[in-house]
Image (cartoon, rainbow, N blue to C red):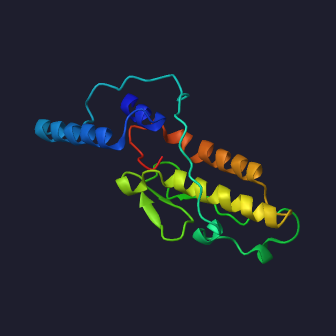
Amino acid sequence: PLLNEAYYEGRVDFDAIKQFYDIFNEIVDVLDTDRHNWADAMKVDEPIYEVQPLPVSEHKEDVCSELFLKDPRSLGDGIKNTVFLPVLNSMKRPTSIAVPLKGYKMYSLGERASYNILVDYYTVTSQCVSELAEADKRHITPSAFDRLFYAWMKTNVLSHLQDKTLYVGF
């Protein structure tokens, strides 16, 4: 759990944690164990606080073309939110994530390909929301999207950061 936490905080890179888990799995194989009768892991009571800021790059114009968007005509009157949030395949034990980015589909949360997928999603979507809000005052604002995404992260990601499983995509 401590190494996973260091990874989520940005203090350990993907290659280092992959190397650790490769060695760990070799030890498990050599010992011919199922890991069920091992001593309980130490519980870490401190939540993750020191997350390193991520560099966010600017995308090209018409960044919304990189996203699958809801049809604004189907949303009715009032404030419009045309962006989709990511979806996990399971709330209890997620193994994959679907993001509404064109060119991306479903990602295994344990594979290197999912590394930074939420950062990529947030970067593209927040810039798209800014473009849409400038063009149509009835569109969701960037700060409203930030609140929606933050709530999604609290519900879908934060609840799994203390799991034994390392979620590369988180």
Residue shown at the point (49%, 41%) measured from the top left: 160
- Pick whichever, 13 or 83, lies toward us: 13
Residue drawn where x is 26% and y is 29% of the image: 38
Horizontal and vertical percent position of residue 82: 72, 66
Decide which of 135, 87 is in the foreground and name it.
Answer: 135
On the image, the x and y values in percent for residue 137 come to: 86, 62
Snapshot quadrant of residue 27: top left
Residue at x 45% of width, y 49% of height: 93
Q: Which residue is drawn at 25% across and 40% down?
A: 19
Q: Which residue lies furthest to the left in this view?
A: 30
Residue closest to the far right: 77
37 or 167: which is nearer to us?
167
Q: In x, y percent, where is residue 72?
A: 77, 73
Asked whether, in this view, residue 104 is left or right of residue 58, the answer is left
Residue 165 visible to the viewer: yes
> Can see residue 33?
no
Q: In which quarter of the image is residue 23?
A: top left
118 or 60: which is nearer to us?
60
Residue 125 location (% of width, % of height): 63, 59
Count of all numbered marks drawn on residues in the image: 0
125 over 13 or under it: above or below: below
Residue 10's image quarter? top left
Tell whether 152 sits left or right of 52: right
Instruction: Say whether residue 14 is left or right of residue 132.
Output: left
Rendered position, 155 above or below 79: above
